Each structure stands twice: as C-alpha cells, then as structure tokens.
Amino acid sequence: SQTIHQWPATLVQPVGSPLSLECTVEGTSNPNLYWYRQAAGRGLQLLFYSVGIGQISSEVPQNLSASRPQDRQFILSSKKLLLSDSGFYLCAWRRGELNTEAFFGQGTRLTVV
Amino acid sequence: AQSVTQLDSHVSVSEGTPVLLRCNYSSSYSPSLFWYVQHPNKGLQLLLKYTSAATLVKGINGFEAEFKKSETSFHLTKPSAHMSDAAEYFCVVSQSGFQKLVFGTGTRLLVSP
C-alpha cells in the first residue's frame, strides 16, 4: 500500500531563517506531488505541484520554492522566512491518471516568530 | 475555470440529528468531485468521490453525497451525527485532463451532545 511521510510535524523558526520541509511517498511510482498551505480558518491554497522529477509548477508568487530531486521526494524551501509564511503545510500525492483523489500527509505546523 | 463554493462556513447539529453540508461547483467539463474531512492539526482524509459513475456516492463513516448536474451541486449528508464527526469538511473539484484539485473554503461541523 502507499504511504506518505511529511516532516517535521511542528516547526518554530525566526524571521529571516531558512526553511526545508520534506515529503516522501512510498509504494507508488511517478506520482503527482503537491504542496498546499492552510492559513488559520481558511481553505487550502495550492503552492506547487510536480508531475515528474525536476518539473515544478508554481501557483502563487511568493517567498517559497519547491524541488523534486527524486521521483517520490518533494521539498518545500525558503531562503528567508517571513511572518506571513506561518501556517499549516500539507503535502499530497495523486496517481498520474485522470480524476483520481489526492492522499495527504499529516501536515507541518510552521510558526515564524 | 473550475471552482467550488461551500455555502456554509459553520454548521451546528445535535448528536443523532441529520447532517447536511452544501457544495456547489462550477466546471466547464465533466468534473470529478470529492469530499475530504480534516480533524484539528491533521491531514485530510478522503470521505468519498464522484467520478461520473453512480450519482449517489457512499463514503466512509456513514456519509454520502449526491451529484446533481442540473443544480451543479454535490451536497454531503449523514442521517445521524456522531460526536466524532466534528471536524472541517472540504468539497473539492477536479477537471478531466487537469492536474490540479480546487478546494472549497471548508465547512466546520460542530456536534453538540
């Protein structure tokens, strides 16, 4: 069966510090991978998605970047965090087929102080 | 472009009474629709999905939803609420051929004893 791992679960970082959140998927190959952010009391905002190694699509211009160095690894990064980067970050994967559902990791609660 | 509207930000019910969470979608083509549930500080779990098969879809934990093309709706229902149903619920649309899922803003379900 497929599983998705996302870490860390919580993170407190000072403004201006770098960020690296990692997500890995097991039990499938060539998944579509996604990073979402959920601000307090709001819905999910798609940040990045990837349909293959090295292929990244950015949805929102911002302080963040994403990379996919391996087929089942997806990394969210920032060189300098802003207060507005605080939120709940979710990684997800889908099969590369039409109309399939997404499977989510447990999320990372990021607080920038 | 596809979109979903969740008509209620909060719904309050008593334990044992029916649940109705409303969702309307906008889509140029035949959509796939999903309902997800999120408990506090957790990832999202798929409740059910519609992918152009039966219009009445049964999901986990006694939930079901009916796809009504004429009304562009995909409302989520449950005959009898349980305390453990208290959570945030998201309606999601995916269009054929598109890699992205579009989320509604969520409905928080409150269940009182």
Image (cartoon, grey):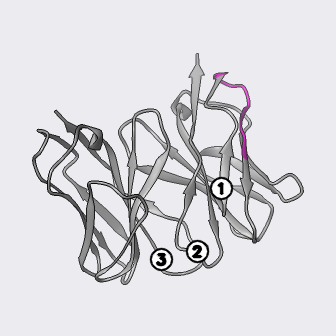
Q: Name the residue under label 1.
A: B3
Mark 1 nearby-residue class (10 Å; few <14, some 14–19, many ≥20): some
Chain ID at mark 2: B
User: Residue A69's spot in the image, x, y percent?
Assistant: 21, 78
Q: Is residue A21 visible?
A: no
Q: What element carries label 2?
A: loop
For residue B32, above or below residue A14: below
Farthest residue to the right: give it.
Answer: B70
Chain ID at mark 3: A
Q: What segment is highlighted magenta in the picture?
A: B13-23
Q: How far apart are marks 1 and 3 (CA)?
A: 21 Å
Within the magenta stretch, is there residue A60?
A: no
Farthest residue to the front: give it.
Answer: A61
Q: Mark 3 points at which residue?
A: A95
Q: Which mark is residue B58?
A: none
Q: Quadrant of the C terminus of chain A?
A: top left
Dot 1 amino acid type:
Ser
For the point 57% across and 46% down, the residue is: B90
Residue in front for this viewpoint, A9 or A79: A79
Within the magenta stretch, is there residue B16?
A: yes
Q: Residue B98 carries which label?
A: 2
Task: Answer with mark 1 or mark 2, whichever residue precedes in sequence.
Answer: 1
Mark 2 nearby-residue class (10 Å; few <14, some 14–19, many ≥20): few
**Left or right: B93 with respect to B75?**
left
Dot 2 amino acid type:
Phe
Q: Marks 1 and 3: CB-CB under 8 Å?
A: no
Q: How far apart are marks 1 and 2 (CA)?
A: 13 Å
